[in-house]
Amino acid sequence: MPELLPELDPVVHGKLRLALLSLLVGVEEADFTWLRDKTGSTDGNLGAQMLKLEEAGYVAMQKRFAGRKPQTLYRMTPTGRKALANYVTSLKRLLNGAL
Amino acid sequence: MTDFETTNPPRRDDLVQRIELMEAMIAEGRRATTRFGWIFVMWGLLYYAAIAWEVYLPAPAFAWPACMVLGFVIIRAWRWRLKRSGAGDEGIRSRSISAVWGAMGCAIFLYIGAAAFSHHIMNPAVNAAVLFFLGLAHAISALILRWPAQGAAAAVWWIGGIAIFLAPVDATIYIFLVATFFGMVLFGLYAMMLERQRAASLVQHHA
């Protein structure tokens, strides 16, 4: 059923990206280290996936200093929330009938 | 955690895996957003209960100690339950805020105990200090969380503390009642409302 595939947003569907969006949906903002620890990802992979999410407009990044330590904070954008909501709807539809 | 190829048609197992992954991650996120608003409402109501007991019930000397101990027991039980369920928040921000309020609680307990023991408890300045303690804890939390609403709660307590010095002695109790309403009960209800909005997860909406 290849025609069903386009319904799943490929940006959201990536396993690590989906995990990141699911983490971010419940928090106001999260820092890079927290996301890395929760997903068990490497710095490089996490950075690359966050960049993809940022480019898609699903997350917003902010850099700041906590004392002298640089901190990278991410939060989900309204577009990201909508994309995740659409993804869940598509998943549900696929699971309920199509597959 | 490797990325998932999306070039092939999705298999049911893969999709089920995605749902499980989302549920697990949302639960992880929720651990970092444990609800605290009710604690403020509870303390506010316990202040009112203590005052009501003091005025209307026998053994008024036990009113404040009993209500405060009850509050501590409820908090301890809640924390124990959180820890047991694995949902305790381990974040540095949460630990900092818990530390501030825990230390403030100890300070007030010792301060009031010492004031009562030395018969200074009826002095308005002693009561005003309690309001400044509470305002201080709110203000530190507000600064950590960068949350103006809690800054407003701090201001309520501090204004109350100042008002106690300026108003007649009889007004102290009324100032405390008003500060408790705005700085604890109303603030706690507002926090609960925000927490409820935040916790409304997409998965629940689409279930």
Image (cartoon, coloured by chain):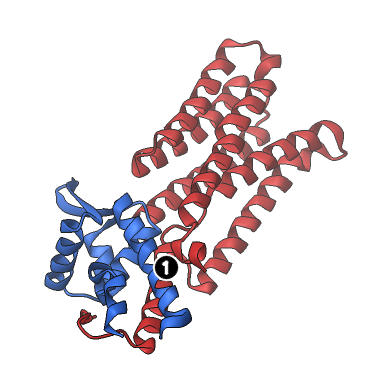
- The amino acid marked with disc number 1 is Thr
Residue B17 picture location, percent across and down: 37, 83
Placement of B61 over or under B91, stated as above or below: above
Query: Looking at this view, is B93 or B170 the one in front?
Result: B93
User: Element type at marker 1?
Assistant: helix
Q: Which residue corresponds to the image point at 17% horizontal and 46% vertical from the top-left?
A: A64
The residue under the point 26% across, 73% down is: A6
What residue lies at 46% left-to-right and 26% top-to-bottom?
B155
Instruction: Name the one closer to the observer, A1 or A37.
Output: A1
Left or right, residue B66 beside residue B15: right
Chain letter for the part of the structure drawn in red: B
Rendered residue at 86%/33% (across/down)? B56
Residue B144 screen position, x and y as percent: 35, 43
Specify few, some or many for label 1: CA neighbours under 10 Å numbering under 14, 14-19, or 20 or more. some
The one of B144 and A19 positioned closer to us in this rendering: A19
Question: Can residue B89 be seen by looking at this rendering?
Answer: no
Q: Is residue B196 above or below residue B79?
A: above
Tell me: residue A68, above or below residue B152: below
Q: For chain A, what colour was chosen?
A: blue
Q: Chain of mark 1?
A: A
Residue at which label 1 appears: A89
Percent coordinates x, y for residue B181 in the rendering? 63, 31
The front one of A33 and B14 is: B14
Q: Is residue B74 left or right of residue B106?
A: right
